[in-house]
Image (cartoon, helix red, strand yellow):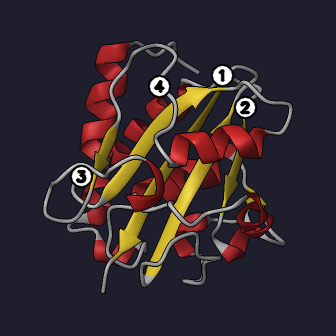
């Protein structure tokens, strides 16, 4: 695990996340991490390190905070639809979020870019430290948190009103991150 700084964090976020995607981090302030994750998803908190977020709606406009954002209707009960996933699985899911249906075959030239994209995902998740935990709404993790998430089924427990959404929640003792992609139509 490498030490991450703001420059490498930003570079890796930009390599993985673009228009219509969500990547934000906030501080852990509650005993129940789901409350902190919900604050991040609603953009009701700030990055504790002051590092940038990438939260861009389709068309490139910023996602608004609160009820008009992509997670505006999410409640704590939605977190019953997230499952533990290994660090490797979380990295793989982060890579696939850039594809419309969250599968590797939707990533142009994936076989040539796999190592580079995985390296960026690893750098983003390194921020959370060695003892971090990861969760996803990809149903494949329900019974197999260590499964190869590059070849997972395309079923997800939806968090938003979009046709499909998939993401990773990363937890450390001090921070929580939400990294999400959306299929609009």
Which image quarter is the C terminus in?
Answer: bottom left
At label 1, counting other C-alpha atoms closer than 10 Å, the crowd grade (few under 14, some 14-19, many 20 or more) is some
Residue 147 in the figure: left or right of residue 6: right
Q: Mark 2 highlights which residue?
A: 132
Mark closer to the observer (1, 4): 4
Who is closer to the viewer here, 105 or 79? 79
Q: Is residue 114 visible?
A: no
Where residue 147 sits, quadrant-wise, is bottom right
Q: Position of residue 95 (x, y in %)?
A: 41, 55
Counting residues from the start of the chain, the first of labels 1 and 4 encountered is 4
Q: Position of residue 150 (x, y in %)?
A: 52, 67
Residue 173 in the figure: left or right of residue 12: right
| Distance between the alpha carbons at the discs numbered 3 and 2 | 25 Å
Q: Mark 4 highlights which residue?
A: 46
Who is closer to the viewer here, 136 or 112? 136
Q: Mark 3 highlights which residue?
A: 18
Which SS class for mark 1?
loop
| Distance between the alpha carbons at the discs numbered 4 and 3 | 20 Å
Report if the CB atoms under discs 4 and 3 are less than 8 Å apart.
Answer: no
Q: Position of residue 21 (x, y in %)?
A: 33, 56
Report if the CB atoms under discs 2 and 4 are less than 8 Å apart.
Answer: no
Where residue 153 sits, quadrant-wise, is bottom right
Residue 84 in the figure: left or right of residue 174: right
Where residue 152 sits, quadrant-wise, is bottom right
| Distance between the alpha carbons at the discs numbered 1 and 2 | 6 Å
Please tell me which residue is depicted at 47% across the width and 58% down the height of the picture: 67
Q: Mark 1 highlights which residue?
A: 129
Q: Is residue 51 visible?
A: yes
Mark closer to the observer (1, 3): 3
């Amino acid at each position: 695990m490498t030490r991450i700084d703001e420059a490498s964090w930003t570079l890796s976020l930009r390599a993985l996340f673009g228009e219509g995607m969500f990547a934000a981090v906030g501080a852990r302030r509650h005993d129940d991490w789901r409350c902190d994750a919900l604050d991040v998803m609603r953009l009701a908190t700030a990055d504790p390190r002051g590092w940038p977020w990438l939260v861009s709606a389709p068309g490139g406009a910023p996602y608004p905070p609160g009820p008009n954002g992509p997670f505006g209707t999410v409640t704590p009960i939605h977190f019953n639809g997230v499952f533990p996933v290994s660090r490797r699985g979380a990295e793989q899911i982060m890579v696939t979020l850039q594809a419309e249906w969250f599968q590797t075959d939707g990533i142009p030239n994936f076989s040539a870019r796999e190592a580079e994209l995985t390296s960026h995902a690893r750098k983003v998740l390194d921020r959370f430290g060695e003892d971090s935990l990861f969760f996803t709404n990809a149903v494949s993790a329900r019974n197999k948190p260590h499964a190869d998430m590059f070849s997972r089924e395309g079923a997800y427990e939806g968090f938003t009103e979009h046709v499909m959404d998939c993401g990773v929640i990363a937890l450390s003792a001090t921070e929580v991150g939400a990294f999400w992609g959306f299929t609009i139509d």
